Image (tube, rainbow, N blue to C red):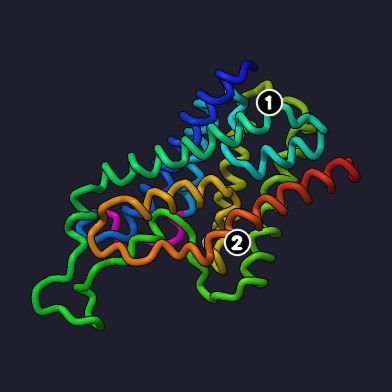
C-alpha cells in the first residue's frame, strides 16, 4: 500500500467512525433529538457500527486500522515502523473531519442547546453538556485509575485483533471487521463505564480539538487537563498488546 492510499483510507475510515460515534452520542444526549435518553447500549452499538462502516470502507486502501493504538500494537509486534506516521496522520485528520460532520448533522440541536426561559440550574431545561458528545469524560476523576482503565481496555481491544489474524478464514471471508466491531461493542458494554472507553487516541483527541474551536452554545470546557489520559492510556495499551502477542503467540 502506498503512503497516499494509507492516508486517504485512514482519513475516510476514521471520519466515518467518528461520524457514527459522535453522532450516536449527540443523538442520545441533545434535546430535540428523537433518540434522546435512549441509553448506553445504544451508544455502544453506535460506536460498534461506526467501526464496522469505517473499517470496511478503509480496508481496500489501508487495511482499516483507524486507531493509533492498533497501529502501534501492530508495529510493536512486526517491527515495521516506516508507515506508522502515515497511519497516525490520517487517523487524526479523519477524526477531526468526522467530528465536524457530526456537528453539522446535529447543528440545529446544538444551536437549540440553550437555557430555556425561566429554567434554573437544577431543572432539566438547562443546556446539555456537549463535551461528552465529542470526547470521553471519567465518571470518577482519578488519574491513576482512569489511566489503568484505558490501558486495560485497549489491551482488551488490540490483543484480540492481533490474535484474530491467526484464525484461519476470517480475513478471507470478510468477517474479520464484523468480529472486531462486535468486540468494540463488548468493550463498551463491559469496560466503558469508568471512563467512556476512549481506547483510541485519535477518537478522543481529534474531536476534543473540534469541540474547543466550534461555536457551540453553552459548550463549557473542553477539559484539556484530562486529555492526556485517553491518549497515553491507549498508546500504552496498544504497545503492551503488541508485546504480549509477540511473546505468547
From the viewer's side, name the closer residue of 6 and 35: 6
Which quadrant of the figure contains the N terminus? top right
Q: Are marks 1 and 2 in contact (CB under 8 Å)?
A: no
Residue located at (90% from left, 45% from top) = 248
Spot occupied by residue 68 in the image (x, y as percentages of width and height): 62, 42
Examine the image and state in which quarter residue 6 appears. top right
Q: Is residue 69 above or below residue 211?
A: above
Residue at the disc numbered 1: 171
Badge 1 element: helix
Residue 136's x, y, as percent? 49, 60
Which span of residues is magenta-colored? Answer: 34-43
Q: How many marks?
A: 2
The residue carrying pointer 1 sits among few (fewer than 14), some (14 to 19) or many (20 or more) residues within 10 Å by Cα, namely few
As drawn, the residue found furthest toward the left would be: 117
Q: Residue at x 44, y 53 (%)?
A: 208
* Residue at 34% across, 42% down: 100
Q: Where is residue 219? Give x, y as percent.
A: 30, 62
User: What residue is at 43 percent from the left and 49 percent from the top?
Assistant: 207
Q: Is residue 38 magenta?
A: yes
- Nearer the observer: mark 1 or 2; the answer is 2
Q: Is residue 164 above or below residue 107?
A: above
Point out which mark residue 229 bears: 2
Query: Is residue 70 highlighted in magenta?
Result: no
The reply, left or right, for residue 221 in relation to residue 68 is left
Q: Secondary structure at mark 2?
A: helix
* Quadrant housing residue 229: bottom right
Question: For the C terminus, which image quadrant?
Answer: top right
Return the residue found at the far top: 2
Amino acid at each position: 500500500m502506498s503512503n497516499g492510499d494509507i492516508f486517504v483510507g485512514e482519513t475516510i475510515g476514521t471520519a466515518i467512525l467518528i461520524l457514527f460515534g459522535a453522532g450516536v452520542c449527540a443523538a442520545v444526549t441533545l434535546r430535540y433529538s428523537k433518540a434522546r435518553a435512549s441509553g448506553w447500549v445504544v451508544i455502544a452499538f453506535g460506536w460498534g457500527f461506526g467501526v464496522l462502516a469505517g473499517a470496511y470502507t478503509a480496508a481496500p486502501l489501508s487495511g482499516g486500522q483507524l486507531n493509533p493504538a492498533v497501529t502501534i500494537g501492530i508495529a510493536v509486534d512486526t517491527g515495521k515502523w516506516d508507515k506508522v506516521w502515515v497511519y497516525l496522520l490520517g487517523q487524526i485528520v479523519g477524526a477531526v473531519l468526522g467530528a465536524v460532520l457530526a456537528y453539522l448533522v446535529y447543528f440545529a440541536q446544538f444551536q437549540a442547546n440553550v437555557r430555556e426561559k425561566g429554567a434554573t440550574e437544577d431543572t432539566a431545561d438547562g443546556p446539555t453538556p456537549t463535551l461528552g458528545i465529542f470526547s470521553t469524560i471519567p465518571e470518577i476523576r482519578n488519574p491513576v485509575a482512569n489511566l489503568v482503565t484505558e490501558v486495560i481496555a485497549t489491551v482488551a481491544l488490540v490483543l484480540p485483533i492481533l490474535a484474530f489474524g491467526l484464525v484461519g478464514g476470517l480475513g478471507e471471508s470478510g468477517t474479520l471487521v464484523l468480529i472486531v466491531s462486535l468486540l468494540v461493542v463488548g468493550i463498551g458494554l463491559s469496560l466503558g463505564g469508568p471512563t467512556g472507553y476512549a481506547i483510541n487516541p485519535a477518537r478522543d483527541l481529534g474531536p476534543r480539538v473540534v469541540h474547543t474551536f466550534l461555536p457551540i452554545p453553552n459548550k463549557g470546557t473542553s477539559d484539556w487537563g484530562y486529555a492526556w489520559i485517553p491518549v497515553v492510556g491507549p498508546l500504552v495499551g496498544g504497545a503492551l498488546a503488541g508485546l504480549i502477542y509477540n511473546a505468547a503467540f
